[in-house]
Image (cartoon, rainbow, N blue to C red):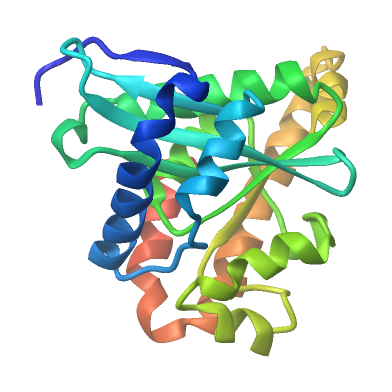
Amino acid sequence: MKSQFFKVIVASEAHFDFAPLICEEMESSARARGTGIAKRTPEYLREKMTEGKAVIAFSETDEWAGFCYIETWGHGKYVANSGLIVSPHFRKGGLGKQIKRKIFELSREKYPEAKIFGLTTGLAVMKINSELGYEPVTYSELTDDDAFWAGCRSCVNYEILTSKERKNCLCTAMLYDPEEKRQEMNMQDPARKARRLKVFAEKWQRAISRARTVFRDKFDSAAASLVTLFL
């Protein structure tokens, strides 16, 4: 797909009419991938728009192109960038990365001390997250807020999550820790940087190992792709 210009902005009440279309596309995309997604209503998305906790993208001709929103958990200690969706007309053109970067910047602006996390089954999203500074983590490092996990009930994989006592599922957990990043910025010693890279690689290997244990028959090819992308 040839390069296009997109306008990615903070959503507001002016974009309420797009909420039903966005919800429909989220569900349709999840069905096409054969993966789960926590369902959201148009009213829920409009609430995010009103609060200034969502970004929306448009093409050069003002056609809706994409969307993502912010959720907070644990009294603002954790933030999730959720519901990333790109219109089928504008996929494979880099728009997903633009939206992710915009919602990430908005999250850092609104919640500078919060840990930003995500759960995803998509390799492309994992790669974008990694470029933004996220690292793979265990589910135990995510919020323990029951309200967050309740949102997974509409996911087709919810039974897997509960059977594993919320310790793992098909999704890979990734986390951006601002305090950890500040410490990294202060690390000028090359030996310390080397150790940090080693820890990062070990985290990915553990994430791959856990997923292979749960989904051994389906995971070998995906694991190989992850290693190629991130290590």
> Measuring 20% from the left and 34% from the top, which residue is drawn there?
92
> Measuring 34% from the left and 32% from the top, which residue is drawn there?
66
In-image side of 113 versus 168 (left or right): right
> Measuring 83% from the left and 60% from the top, which residue is drawn there?
145
Q: Residue 219, relative to residue 70: is it above or below?
A: below
Q: Which of the 4 image quarters holds residue 219? A: bottom left
Q: Quadrant of the N terminus?
A: top left
Q: Residue 186, relative to residue 15: is it above or below?
A: above
Farthest-out residue, bottom: 163
* x and y percentages locating residue 6 in the rendered image: 28, 14
In-image side of 178 versus 155 (left or right): right
Q: Which of the 4 image quarters holds residue 59? A: top left
Q: Is residue 207 visible?
A: yes
In-image side of 197 versus 69 (left or right): right
Q: Residue 183, relative to residue 169: is it above or below?
A: above
Most foreground residue, 10 or 92: 10
Q: Residue 223, relative to residue 214: is it above or below?
A: above
> Measuring 40% from the left and 40% from the top, which residue is drawn there?
19
* x and y percentages locating residue 83 in the rendered image: 48, 46
Most foreground residue, 37 or 100: 37
Most foreground residue, 136 or 74: 74
Q: Which of the 4 image quarters holds residue 63? A: top left
For the image shown, how many numbered marks are present on the structure? 0
* x and y percentages locating residue 226 in the rendered image: 43, 53
Q: Is residue 11 visible?
A: no
In-image side of 161 versus 178 (left or right): left
